[in-house]
Image (cartoon, grey):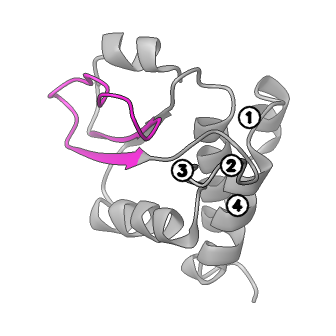
Amino acid sequence: MSREEAERYEPGLKEICISISDPDAEPAGVSAQFVAVLRLHFDDITERNEQSDILFAADHARAITEFLDKWPDAERVMVHCNMGVSRSPGVALGLSDARGWATAALERSHPGWNRLVRGVMNKTTTNTNPRRST
């Protein structure tokens, strides 16, 4: 979901939010109706171009996994970034891979998903799904 969509969205269920922003951006103004919000800041790039770039890293992936683990009874996880086409689909696909959730529809609807984000999520969260072989 894009930041604009996320700022208009009102949860109807017991929902948690993963809010992704650029490092220098103000946090998104998401609904207070979310049970919990995890705010992350990293650039939408797959390799460092400048010294100040912040790449998605294992610490981000662990924070996401720990956040989900704190809310096992959440009925929905909403993930957003600035445009909703790269970082948030990368996170959603990485979570889906780790948790054994279907990915095909998300891959088709968001073909520009960030490969670095999903790759780091997969590498970091391999052992979080008891159904997934190691």
36 magenta-colored: yes
Q: CA distance from mark 4 to mark 2?
A: 6 Å
Magenta span: 15-40
Q: Which mark is residue 52?
A: 3
Q: Residue at x 47, y 35 (%)?
A: 22
Task: Answer above or below: position of 8 versus 90.
Answer: above
Which numbered mark, 3 or 2, is in the foreground of this view? Answer: 3
Report which residue position mark 4 lands on. Answer: 97
| Tag 3 secondary structure | loop
Q: Which mark is residue 89?
A: none
Q: State the image quarter where residue 127 is shown.
A: bottom right
- Label 3: how many Cα within 10 Å (few below 14, some 14–19, many 20+): few
Between marks 3 and 2, how big is the CA–CA gap? Answer: 27 Å
Q: Position of residue 49 (x, y in %)?
A: 72, 48
Q: Is 49 left, or right, of 84 in this rendering?
A: right
Task: Classify mark 2: helix, strand or loop.
Answer: helix
First of labels 4, 3 by sequence position: 3
Residue 79 point in image, percent of width and height: 48, 37
The amino acid on which the numbered mark 3 sits, given as a three-letter code, is: Ser
Specify the amino acid type for callout 1. Answer: Leu
> Residue 85: x percent and y percent?
68, 26
Tell whether label 1 touches label 2 (CB within 8 Å): yes
Q: Where is mark 1, residue-wise?
A: 106
* Badge 3 or badge 1: first in the primary sequence: 3
**Alpha carbon of mark 1 to alpha carbon of mark 4: how far?**
12 Å
Farthest left residue?
32
Q: Which residue is mark 2?
A: 93
* Among the two numbered marks 3 and 2 on one chain, the one whose residue lies closer to the N terminus: 3
Distance from Cα at disc 4 to Cα at disc 3:
30 Å
